[in-house]
Image (tube, grey):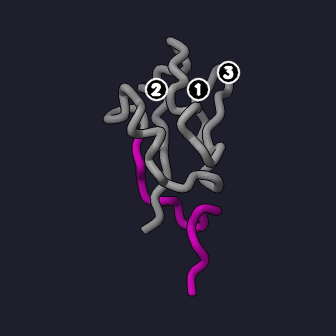
Amino acid sequence: MVRVARVDPEHCPAGSCGCFTCLDRCEAGALSFAAGVGIVIDEGLCTGCGACVSCCPLAEVALRLVPARSGSASEPPKR
């Protein structure tokens, strides 16, 4: 099963206090910040490595690894 990071903007501190720890940890460049929104994850670039989750101070509620959506660009082709 392919997993990707998914953020819950209601709990992510990036939009309110400026925590951007996860942005620095994403080697794939899948995370970005959008003003008024917070952290945005490009599931097509996310490798599911979990580096962002491991450093997030609120990972239990704000940032998690979840199964990729069907048809996601990060999902390998079916054989």
Q: Which of 44 and 36 is in front in this view?
A: 44
First in residue order: circle 2 vs circle 3: 2
Q: Where residue 72 appears, x then y in whole percent?
A: 60, 62
User: What secondary structure is found at the residue carrying circle 1?
Assistant: strand
Answer with the quarter of the image where residue 64 lies: top left
| Residue drawn at the location 37% of the way across and 34% of the way down | 59
Residue type beneath disc 3: Ala
Answer with the quarter of the image where residue 1 lies: bottom left
Query: Which residue is outermost to the bottom?
Result: 79
Vertical placement of residue 40 versus 57, above or below: below
User: What secondary structure is found at the residue carrying circle 3?
Assistant: loop
Q: Is residue 78 magenta?
A: yes
Determine which residue is flagged by label 1.
38
Seen in the image, is 38 located left or right of residue 4?
right
| CB atoms of marks 1 and 2 within 8 Å | yes
Determine which residue is flagged by label 3.
35
Vertical placement of residue 26 versus 55, above or below: below
Structural distance between the alpha carbons of marks 2 and 3: 13 Å
Structural distance between the alpha carbons of marks 1 and 3: 6 Å
Determine which residue is flagged by label 2.
12
| Residue drawn at the location 56% of the way across and 67% of the way down | 75
Q: Where residue 62 appears, x then y in whole percent?
A: 41, 32
Query: Which residue is outermost to the top?
Result: 17
